[in-house]
Amino acid sequence: MYKIFYQPEGHWFGDCMPYCEDGVFYLYHQRDTRNPGPMGEPFGWSLCTTSDFRHYQEHGTAIEHGSNDDQDQYIYAGSVYQTAQDTYTAFYTGANKIFKKKGIPSQKLMQATSHDLINWQKNGNAEQIVPQEGYDVFAWRDPFIVWNDEKEEYLLVLGARAPGDNRERTGRLVSFTSKDMNKWDFQGDFWYPGLFTMIEMPELFKIGEWWYLIISEFSDKNKMIYRMSRSLDGPWIAPHDDAFDGRAYYAGRTATNGTNRILFGWVPTKENDDDLGNYEWGGTFVPQEVYQRPDYSLGVKPVKSVLDAFCVKTALADVHLQTIDTHKTQILTENSSTCFTLEATVKIAEGTRGFSIFIYGNELEEAYEYRFSLNEKQLTFDKTPNWPWFQYMNKGLERPINLQNDTEYKLSIIVDDDIAVLYINGTALSVRMYQKPGTKLSFGVTDGDIELTNIVLSKLEQ
């Protein structure tokens, strides 16, 4: 179905625990059967590897899930860490839905060991990293380990919450420390913002002098966000834009090959493959490259090897659209196909109210629209015309964007069947598109003057 983004055949891609060694990225991930729905059947950790995000080698199941009587009926998220030469440890969440119904602690940390990153041996429960007094025994998951150079110790953080109603915003990260990865000491709350009912998929990494904390949450905006600090002890500062993408990109963690730091998140499907449907758990893996801006905040951009895969390139004529009090549209191509990239340079004149990119348009000008509302400094996604109201459930598909007049910006869009991702100025917005009214690709401006130059439409080699 997908030609560039990764989704295992017959399954949906879940949370990913990436690891990189010798230029090869190991994608430990959950595979959902959707039988009878999302997370219906138990899963373990499956594994595929890639070095270019174009070709993937399948390695089957890395860590098998247990039986209905075992703690790890489901294997939720965790992390992989090299503990010695040719020895690797995975801390993961063993979850049992039946236990929860019986009032038995349903989420515990467990361990496995490998000597080649392919074959893993389970080692049972991580007995020292159990839910502590005062914390919910049904919400204790997604451990992540990092080495703290300053204190010369390992730091493990995981998502937790206080006991009580699941609607209460007691979600937090707690931490344990260890000198040897064997004896662990509980250190209490690591980050408790009082904003979320639960925090998932935490990660910590350092670029230069700054530490970055990435998390996913599902009770505020249901998306990935991050914080930054000069110390692992905090305080954790929220940048002006604390996200990488919109609602349709979730549960990402990063891994680096020493040169590029790649974000491993998934674009969720929608219920019944319907534009009007709500988002579901799991979907399709879409890699994005994370980079540090001059102000030390983080931006994202397309992975170069993904763009390079689209090697059949067509240069399109420059577009210069001017209007005073109307909307004007220019067709870029009548037949975009269903797998392509669009790259261009955008330059906006003073006073311009907005501009748009239209995907999968038809002769009635029905299309999907990435809209840049310049006065509101916002990028959104929707269907147009939105009649009868409404044609697309787009809650959470907006991003803050601040584009300056008379400044050139690189615009990139990757489309792979029903998935599109737009990048501009370090900001991304991923979406799903199911109806696909037509095949036209267009550009438009509302009340203003805008130039689109260096336009290249690229496709995969047949």
Image (cartoon, rainbow, N blue to C red):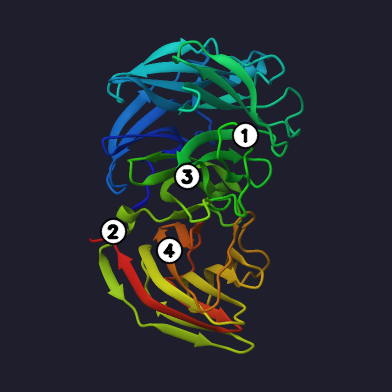
Write down the quadrant of residue 216 in the picture: top right
Counting from the top left corner in percent of width and height, residue 253 is at 47, 39
Q: Residues within 10 Å of mark 1 (few under 14, many from 20)?
A: many
Per the image, label 4 sits on a secondary structure element best described as strand
Residue 154 in the image: x percent, y percent?
Answer: 48, 22
Give the number of the disc on residue 308.
2
Q: Residue at x 32, y 41 (%)?
A: 257
Vertically, is 394 above or below 92? Answer: below
Please tell me whether mark 1 or mark 3 is closer to you in this view. Answer: 1
Mark 2 vs mark 4: which is more N-terminal? 2
Quickly name the residue at label 3.
266
Q: CA distance from mark 2 to mark 3?
A: 21 Å
Position above or below: 441 against 186? below
Answer yes or no: do the residues labelled 1 and 2 have beta carbons within 8 Å? no
Disc 3, SS: strand
> For residue 328, which numbered disc appears in the image?
none
Q: Earlier in the sequence, mark 1 or mark 2?
A: 1
At horizontal 34% and vertical 72% (from top left) the residue drawn is 456
Give the mark nearest the N terminus, 1 or 4.
1
The amino acid on which the numbered mark 3 sits, given as a three-letter code, is: Trp
Name the residue beneath numbered marker 1: 199
Mark 1 and mark 4: Cα distance apart in space: 30 Å
The residue beneath circle 4 is 413
Q: Amino acid at mark 2?
A: Asp
Residue in the foreground of this view, choosing between 280 and 168: 168
